Image (cartoon, rainbow, N blue to C red):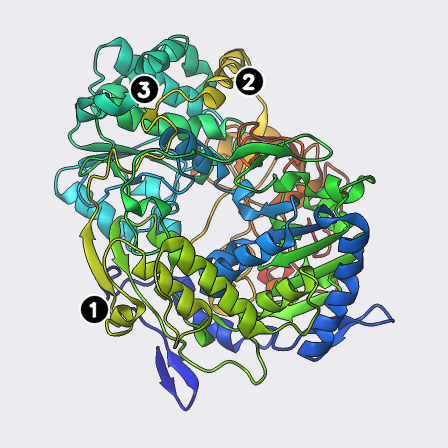
Amino acid sequence: MKVRDGEVVSVRGDADDVFSHGFICPKGVALKALHEDPARLTRPLVRDASGELRDATWDEAFARADELLTPILADHGRNAVGAYLGNPSVHSLGATLYARALLKSLGSRSIFTASTVDQMPKHVSSGLMFGGALTIPVPDVDRTMHMLMLGANPLASNGSLMTAPDMRGRLKALRDRGGRLVVVDPRRSRTAEVADEHHFIRPGTDAHLLFALVNVITGEGLADLGRLAEFTDGTEDVARLAEPFTPEAVEPVTGIPADEIRRIARELAAASPAVVYARIGTTTQRFGSLASWLVDVLNVITGNLDREGGAMFPLAAAGQSNASGRRGGRGLAIGRWQSRVRGADEVMGELPVSCLAEEIETEGEGQVRALITIAGNPARSTPNSARLEAALGNLEALVCIDLYLNETTRHADVVFPAPSPLSKPHYDIALYQLGVRDVGNWSDAVVPAEDEMLQEWETLVRLMGIVTGQGPDADVATIDDFIATAMAQQLGVEPDADRRGPERLIDIMLRAGPYDVTLADFEASPHGIDFGPLKPRLPDVLKTPSGMIELAPERIVADVDRLRASLGEHVNGDMVLIGRRTLRSNNSWMHNLEPLVKGPLRCTLHVNPADARRLGLVDGGTAHVRSRAGEVDAPVEVTEKVMPGVVSLPHGWGHGAPGANLPVAARYAGVNVNALTDELDLDPISGNAVLNGVPVEISPQEAAGRTQPAAGSGQSAIGAHI
């Protein structure tokens, strides 16, 4: 960052950074625009007697939050106050560390996060197989020779559950050293375009394909666990479970010819080293947990787990509870309680966000009457968002922490602003635990926060004071000392008495970590510290109760019958909806930045030419799209990049709602894909929402008897682009 007189002049990649080597994505460059955005909140907002949100002092805002939350807790219990954590909280050190403390002090079972519209199946499958929700093997992409990738588009996301800057360069290096990239996706994504081969697949059938690969590898005697065999249970069970999923059986379901499936399996088994990697396209479907599980089953039976060039377990400098090297543990926390209305299982202390609307609507003991949101916009990011948004309006209290007055926070009674990312320090606790190389980097604040602006951790601590009965004026320093002391005692280290807030907590975590480093070491290394390439960590990393790789966990195996029954469900002619990610978009929270949203219209409905002809759609026209949950009108983009029978809309759009203050986003309003996704459809193992393979009916807008709608929660606004 080049800064002059407190103003950010420019942003560029750091060529000396140990991990990025100067690579930077457009969203990184856009941090300057985010910092300078006049729509970014800098003062708290409180809803007054007239029903309008107005500027308030911090003390007024905390006092109002106390007035709203404390009686509900007293009269209706802890579960009556829920919380929702959104995606941006992962990118904030203060929110990552102190939101956990707030949730623990709240003591509510009504906890929801963006994980159940994204990645929960991978946490569940990894937890059941290896014992920890973040014990997730990632591709050693820099050393592999064969990479089979399903439902992932790292050229748009730089990896996801695989932290890897410059994936284009990394994939080019794979091919330059004679390796091979095979992509399976219903859409010819940016990543698929650079692959050696790309296979279209019917959305929601990745588990069928993966089981067929297991079928071939085990049936033809190609499995070779190598050193993994001595600490792997369930190999024979997996082979038996795979028997019905022959290539011929899954061909009509997946759309991939049986001979191609056999070839893919044989080439995967013969390659050395090789890795299978899958991401959001496979986790946000009705068999998301099975697909996530089968990815690692393949990595195990081919001997490519915990092997250089295969799927390996990162060892981060901070945050990984499995860094001690002790084998065995309690395993994954799951199913300890259920949601009140639908009976969906808790996973890792949270309930499926698809259940949130009904938990607000349905009267009775434990009804969610108040909600705290932290850096989230569930009114756009969750299934059947229209139903949830209506429920938000019926809450007795909604308290939000956010950068913007968005589609969710516009319903709030109190909104606490968060500081600009450039005015707070950062260490990436979560994503370094998923890195393709073991590194760390501390970033100091670049510019000071606005006058009187509280850091997120201070806001969260004061809310802790409220939910624990200490009132709106609780002593922040005392609570912070308590949190730090508890963490230090748990990890067995001495805290630095000269630090406070997130700096003190991250220093404690580093001191307890595996590399004998402190925060001072990172402060003295402005380009980061490189701890080297990924290294084998099995069997010590295993935290299952048996201390083994559980290749056939009971909870997973119980769901295979559902997958087997679906072999007969193939239907010709049905249209299904999938999402998509674009390089300049990060969900909904960066759409108010002109550098990211300007240019060609991106929120379009991708339709295959054959389907367009059959349905009477034309490029540049408008389609009426209808599902069980709702309907939208979307601009059509006819393209061969999406397979026949499939349409695609990007997620995170649908701006322009009254009361929100996102003027740039409103000019590029787009269509809210979650007006179509179904809150009743879940992956039963993980509770994850089904956002891919959503059945839809499509017709030309004119045939539906509709006129061009105004911008809004589910409708398109394309006038600004014409």
**Toward the viewer: 146 or 233?**
233
Where residue 16 is drawn, which disc sits there?
1
Judge depth for marks 2 and 1 and give the one in front: 1
| Furthest residue toward right | 50
Corner quadrant of residue 349: top right
Q: Amino acid at mark 3?
A: Asp
Describe the element under mark 1 as helix, strand or loop: loop
Observer-side mark, 3 or 1, equals 3
Crowding near the residue tagged with mark 3, few <14, some 14–19, many ≥20 C-alpha atoms within 10 Å? some
Q: Are marks 2 and 3 in contact (CB under 8 Å)?
A: no
* Residue identifier under label 3: 233
Out of 184 and 104, give the one closest to the viewer. 104
Q: Residue furthest bottom?
A: 5
Q: Give left or right: position of 216 versus 177.
A: right
Q: Judge from the rendering whether residue 127 lies leftward or rightward of residue 633; answer left or right.
A: left
Q: Tags 3 and 1 in contact by the CB under 8 Å rule?
A: no
Image location of residue 668, percent across then percent down: 59, 61
Q: Give coordinates of residue 718: x percent, y percent.
A: 62, 56
Q: Relative to 683, is 41 above or below? A: below
User: How far from the left and from the top, in percent, is residue 338?
Assistant: 65, 33
